[in-house]
Image (cartoon, grey):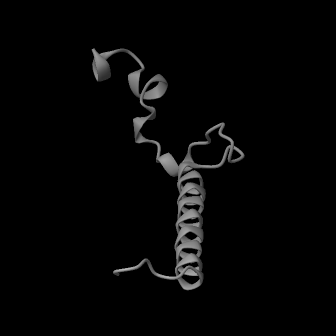
Amino acid sequence: MGCSEPDFWDTMGTINEPLADKLYHTTFGGLGADATADKIGIGILTATAVGVVAHAAISLIKPPKEGE
């Protein structure tokens, strides 16, 4: 049962390895977990910024509705 098994820490104890050191086979080139999270965060931030700029541009060009 878990850590009482023979050679547990040598064969099954990978939980102690930092996630940043693990390599993942992802669409982001198999980089570590931190790099993958950074790229996803940058993508979301970029999409948000594009949405804010588009909203501001449309708000400047389009006249306000009647009664507002």
- Residue 58 pos. (x, y %): 57, 76
Q: Position of residue 67 (x, y in %)?
A: 34, 80
Can you say which quadrant of the picture contains the C terminus? bottom left
The picture places residue 4, in percent across and down from the top left corner, at: 28, 18
* Residue located at (41% from left, 36% from top): 15
35, 16: nearer the viewer: 35
Query: Which residue ends up furthest to the right in the rendered image?
Result: 29
Q: Quadrant of residue 43?
A: bottom right
For residue 11, above or below residue 44: above
Give the residue displayed 53% in from the left and 80% down from the top. Answer: 56
Q: Residue at x 41, y 28 (%)?
A: 9
On the rendered structure, is 3 left or right of 35? left
| Nearer the observer, 60 or 22 | 60
Residue 64 location, x and y as percent? 46, 81
**Most distant residue in the front direction:** 66
Res. 57 image quadrant:
bottom right
